[in-house]
Image (cartoon, rainbow, N blue to C red):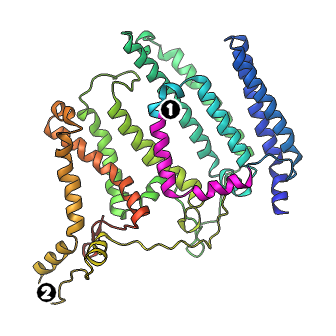
Amino acid sequence: MHNEFFLKDVAGFLGGYYTFIALVNGVAALILWRKQGRTGWAVTWAGFAVAMMILAAMAIQGSASMVPALPQGVRSLVNALSGPVLYTLGTTGLFILLFVFRKFFVQPMVAWTILNAMLLLMGLSMADENFAAIVMKPDNVPIVGLVFLLAFFTWLATKQAVVNDERAAQGLPPMEKVNDEKVLVWPDLVYTELICMVAVSALLLFWAIFLPAPLEEPASSVKTPNPSKAPWYFLGLQEMLVYFDPWYAGVVLPSLVIFGLMAMPYLDFNKEGNGYYSIANRKFAYLSYQFGFFVLWITLIILGTFLRGPNWNFFGPFEFWTPYKVEVLNNVDLNQMFWVNLMNRPLPRAPQDAGALTQVGTILLREAPGLLALGAYLVLLPPLMAVTVFRSYFAKMGFIRYMIMANLMLLMLTLPIKMILRWTFNLKYIVSIPELSLNF
């Protein structure tokens, strides 16, 4: 009965949602037919618009048997596969797929098909009460919109880069040089900004009327929300705190991001692609930035917003957020894995009356596996890459610029490496020195 009441509450919204999709595709079909002469695609999207109107009529009925929804078996399968490992591997694989086949995905009709598939999937998913409780929460509605906006502008920039790369292969200048005409600040730019300001103000006004702000009672140490989440733009940082100490996740990594972005103009030796969109001429820079931004930041925000529930446990998108879910965590440090599990002996410990030098030696012996692993990663790996995969970069950049670039890249990769080690081997810290509150 509870699900029946829920469907009656969202029936009007889902009906309007499917009607909106139908209207948009109807307009798209008309434009394709009248202005572009693409009759086949026009018929396709007109038929899709009719199908959306049928779904809208079914949704307005508000009964459990009429509202279109994903089958329960599909929802259960998605919940079962929604683990952190598969989520990370899936997003990384999607990132690689979109890069390799970017010429296919930037085609307008391919992108439009993917957009409609995403909208249809979201509509079918919102008939699930657990999914709707997360996505339709007033705090999360802007984040859903930002995801679609980010996808659109990424597609737009990638499409422009693909066009420029194809023109460069033909010996033609980029599109930015073709349309390189001066535009006056007044009145062209100012009028455009004024129109955008009025439109955005109207949008925010209607938003505030129809979607009230989720104001809660004043903060109290007696009653804290579960889960207690940071603002959406800090959720990636909060996710990092699961795998690193606060000094590293909250201070070192953000500082490295800021200084790394500041250092980019001084580290960059490739002058191609400056002032216009291009991927073929700047593949390493493009992949490094996109991987850091999308895989190591945006996906963590999505994970923290929609998949992290009470007690910061991982939940599937169609799973009920119960505070009683218990996950057994037996995370161990690398020193325990080496000395206790592998060598079958206790951790090296200094006598209580030992001198400072003896205690330091004992700590170094205890943390030798982790220190050696970090040394090999940060000290030996950059020269090895300089004579193998990054030989051309080392020759063009020089020793200092190359070492800064290599270490910034390796420090960025510590996040996914540590996440994978936590999920697969329950590794807590590679180096753990509680005597100095120094853990990594």
Which numbered tag is attached to residue 354?
2
Q: Left or right: 266 with respect to 422?
A: left
Q: Left or right: 416 with respect to 34?
A: left
Q: Where is residue 251 in the image (x, y as percent from the top left)?
A: 34, 57
Q: Where is residue 276 in the image (x, y as percent from the top left)?
A: 39, 21
Most common SS among magenta residues: helix
Q: Left or right: 260 with respect to 364?
A: right
Asked whether 347 or 233 is in front, the reply is: 347
Q: Which of marks 1 and 2 is nearer the N terminus?
A: 1
Of all residues, the one furthest to the bottom in this rendering is 353
CA–CA distance in space, label 1 to label 2: 60 Å
Which numbered tag is attached to residue 154?
1
Q: Where is residue 411 in the image (x, y as percent from the top left)?
A: 29, 51
Q: What kind of element bears circle 1?
A: helix
Q: What kind of element bears circle 2?
A: loop
The correct choice, above or below, for 166 with respect to 438 in the image is above
Residue at (51% x, 53% y) in the render? 86
Q: Left or right: 58 with respect to 434?
A: right
Tell me if residue 166 can be seen: yes
Which numbered tag is attached to residue 48?
none
The correct choice, above or below, for 343 with respect to 377 in the image is below
Magenta region, residue range: 71-98
